[in-house]
Image (spheres, rainbow, N blue to C red):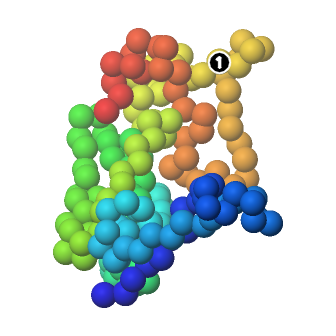
Amino acid sequence: MAEIRLCWGFVRSPTEADSSAGGLQERETAMNAQQFAGVFPLGSHLCRQPMPPMSELKRDMVLLKKQGFNLVKIQEHWMTDEPVEGCCDFSRSEELIAHAAKLDLGVYIGITCEQAPHWLYEKHPDCRMIGRDGRPLVYEAATTLPADGKPGPCYDHPGAMADQL
């Protein structure tokens, strides 16, 4: 197994206090890849809505593992996880998590509740965030993805708070 060498800082060496470097000495630690993975997660954001085909995501995970990555991030979106109130579908994420386990990759799940489903706004039309001018905030950037849902509902609203996942 390959050895990874880390330079983790400088310390003052009493024996070199009068040296031109001011007595600073670099410390180096060696560890194998398994020890490194336990200390330093090295990952990549794997996907977000709209997601590529599952076969492409799984192929990417194999490539990440081959390159020494030990973690993938999966982004969850309330809008796509619960498109119909009370009906959640996590099957895509579950499949990716199972594949990560086969590859011995850790998984970080990012949860974004600002991407509320359409039914929330139909159920609570007054739950949008309100700006300083008293009007509902609207986020209309040209680069916004359909699942972005920015700026999201106001979670001070009792209905929005009660209905979130």
Residue 72 makes an appearance in the image? no
Q: Is residue 154 left or right of residue 98?
A: right
- Residue pictured at 51% horizontal, 70% vertical: 28
- Residue pictured at 22% horizontal, 59% vertical: 94
Q: Nearer the viewer, residue 140 or 57?
A: 57
Report which quarter residue 57 is drawn in.
bottom left
Q: Position of residue 43 (x, y in %)?
A: 44, 66
Q: Is residue 83 above or below residue 23?
A: above
Q: Nearer the viewer, residue 21 or 56?
A: 21
Q: Position of residue 108 (x, y in %)?
A: 36, 54
Q: Nearer the viewer, residue 65 or 123?
A: 65
- Residue pictured at 68% horizontal, 32% vertical: 138
Tell me the quarter of the image containing the N terminus.
Answer: bottom left
Crowd band around label 1 with a 10 angstrom C-alpha radius: few (<14), some (14–19), many (20+): some
Local secondary structure at mark 1 = loop
Q: Is residue 6 above or below residue 151?
A: below
Q: Position of residue 32 (x, y in %)?
A: 34, 77
Report which quarter residue 161 is drawn in.
top left
Residue 157 makes an appearance in the image? yes
Q: Is residue 59 left or right of residue 149?
A: left
Give the residue type at disc 1. Answer: Ile
Report the number of discs: 1
Tell me the quarter of the image containing the C terminus.
Answer: top left
Farthest-out residue, right = 20
Report which quarter residue 105 is drawn in.
bottom left
- Residue pictured at 32% horizontal, 42% vertical: 82
Q: Position of residue 87 (x, y in %)?
A: 23, 41
Q: Is residue 33 above or below residue 75?
A: below
Q: Is residue 120 above or below residue 2?
A: above
Q: Which residue is mark 1?
A: 130
